[in-house]
Image: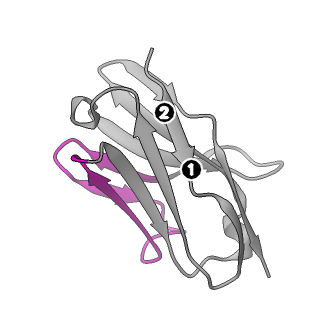
Amino acid sequence: QVQLVESGGGLVQAGGSLRLSCVPSGSIVSFNVVGWQRQAPGKQRELVATITYVGSTNYAVSVKGRFTISRDNFKNTVYLQMNSLKSEDTAVYYCYAIMGSKTSWGQGTQVTVSS
């Protein structure tokens, strides 16, 4: 069972920045895809960003140009750099990793953006 540990969430003012980190229990290069999803109160979970094992990235339209997903293989960590944060970015952010047909999830980290 793969475990994913997220960190970096918190409270920030609108326009500010946060960087989320996700560290899996296995080697990060063994996953086909690592990504972030978020869930705001009363809303469905939605895709934020993904990065493949070859480094290809994909973003939700709502965060493109503001968020950057990256991977540091030496630190075995995936990052989500979030800039120009808006109140609508407030949500619990979940890291997930796909290996073959299996998807593993982190416990989530709260991001709150005050306007």
78, 67: nearer the viewer: 78
32, 42: nearer the viewer: 32
**Residue 60 lies in magenta, yes or no?**
yes
| 53 shown above or below 57 | above
| 26 shown above or below 92 | above
| 73 shown above or below 60 | above
Q: Please state the total of marks drawn on the protein image.
A: 2
- Reading the image, the residue beneath label 1 is 7
113, 52: nearer the viewer: 113
Residue at 56% in and 82% down: 84
**Residue 56 lies in magenta, yes or no?**
yes
For the residues labelled 1 and 2, the Cα–Cα distance comes to 10 Å
| 94 shown above or below 90 | above
Residue at 42% in and 45% down: 35
Give the colour scheme of this rendering.
one colour
Residue at the far front: name it: 75
Look at the image and give the residue range highlighted in magenta. 49-74
Quadrant where the C terminus sits is bottom right
Residue at the far bottom: name it: 15
Residue at 81% in and 50% down: 41
Q: Position of residue 82 (x, y in %)?
A: 51, 70
- Reading the image, the residue beneath label 2 is 4
Q: Secondary structure at mark 2?
A: strand
Residue at 21% in and 52% down: 55
Q: Secondary structure at mark 1?
A: strand
